[in-house]
Amino acid sequence: MGAVGIGPEIGGRADSSAVAGRGPATPARRQGADELAIAGITPMSSCDWPGRLVATVFLQGCPWRCTYCHNSAILDPRTPGVVPWAGVRELLARRRGLLDGVVFSGGEPTRQRGVVAAAQEVRDAGFQVGLHTGGAFPPALARVLTHVDWVGFDVKAPARLYDAITRRGGAAQAFASLRLVLDAGVDVQVRTTVDPTVLTSADVAELTAALAAEGVRDHVLQVVRTDGTTSEYRAAHAAVRDRT
Ligand code: SF4
């Protein structure tokens, strides 16, 4: 997901084994919540869903390789999970009355089909469901959207600059997914992490205007954090900063 909010406190990994260019796992059968590959959980967060106190579940795997990604260990879709869904279930049972909901984050949480069953289960247990997504998989997003109360949607850049951020393309998918969210009427906050090594202020203004034309009412700009990013990215970021 975006540069903010990725920080599993339970089950996070220290190593990185990202594999460039691998696509999503696409199991033919329906996947249950117990089969989710969960990279970690933040048991209580007040910043992953504005105005809500939530547990955040980080799902393994992402098809993109964003310049500023600071959680490379979560990218490889082949890496198994380290937290069982049963652990999330038990956490919710203990935190009933304390938590408003669960946010599914990543990685790209819609990559795993089990997120649909997991979201249904969370709602059936009386909690609200939030979703962080970059919209890489529109059909998968459509499957889970009816079980979601709020979406934090990362828009990386104007379409023509997507590949410069994600390094795997994805503009068409992202904007198709954004359309799905807007048409569904789900509460949404659109966020853009402004990568100064790619985006100028004119690019950001262009994006803001384009999103407003699409009907986006809540667009938040986020500052890049360089901690956890690659040494190459930190150097490029410092060079831009020194020029301005
Ligand atoms: S590579 Fe994936 S997890 Fe990392 S910032 Fe980009 S969308 Fe988020």
Image (cartoon, grey):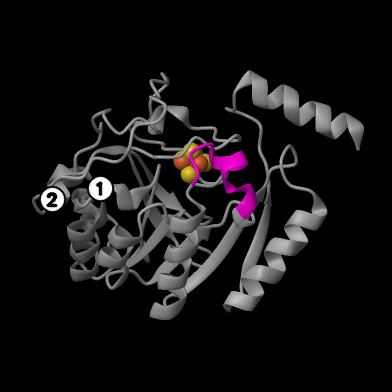
Q: In which quadrant will I find the C terminus?
A: top right
Q: Nearer the viewer, residue 233 or 33?
A: 233
- Residue depicted at 17% across the width and 59% down the height: 117
User: What is the secondary structure assignment of the residue under circle 2?
Assistant: loop
Q: Is residue 217 visible?
A: no
Label 1: which residue?
Answer: 112
State which tag comes first along the sequence, 2 or 1.
2
Q: Is residue 178 left or right of residue 38?
A: right
Residue 64 placement (x, y as % from top left): 46, 39
- Residue depicted at 74% across the width and 63% down the height: 206
Residue 88 placement (x, y as % from top left): 24, 48
Assess whether mark 1 and mark 2 are in contact (beta carbons under 8 angstroms).
yes
Label 2: which residue?
Answer: 31
Q: Is residue 16 visible?
A: yes
Q: Nearer the viewer, residue 31 or 87?
A: 31
Q: On the image, which quarter does residue 122 sit in? A: bottom left
Residue 113 placement (x, y as % from top left): 21, 52
Taking the view exactly as shown, the residue that stands out farthest to the right is 244
Q: Main secondary structure of the magenta part?
A: helix
What stretch of residues is rendered in magenta?
A: 160-169
User: What is the secondary structure assignment of the residue under circle 1?
Assistant: loop
Placement of 66 over or under 239, stated as above or below: below
Q: On the image, which quarter does residue 146 sit in? A: bottom left
Placement of 40 over or under 194, stated as above or below: above
Q: CA distance from mark 2 to mark 1?
A: 8 Å
- Residue depicted at 59% across the width and 59% down the height: 191
Q: Is residue 58 left or right of residue 179?
A: left
Tell me the kind of residue under disc 1. Answer: Gln
- Residue depicted at 59% across the width and 28% down the height: 229
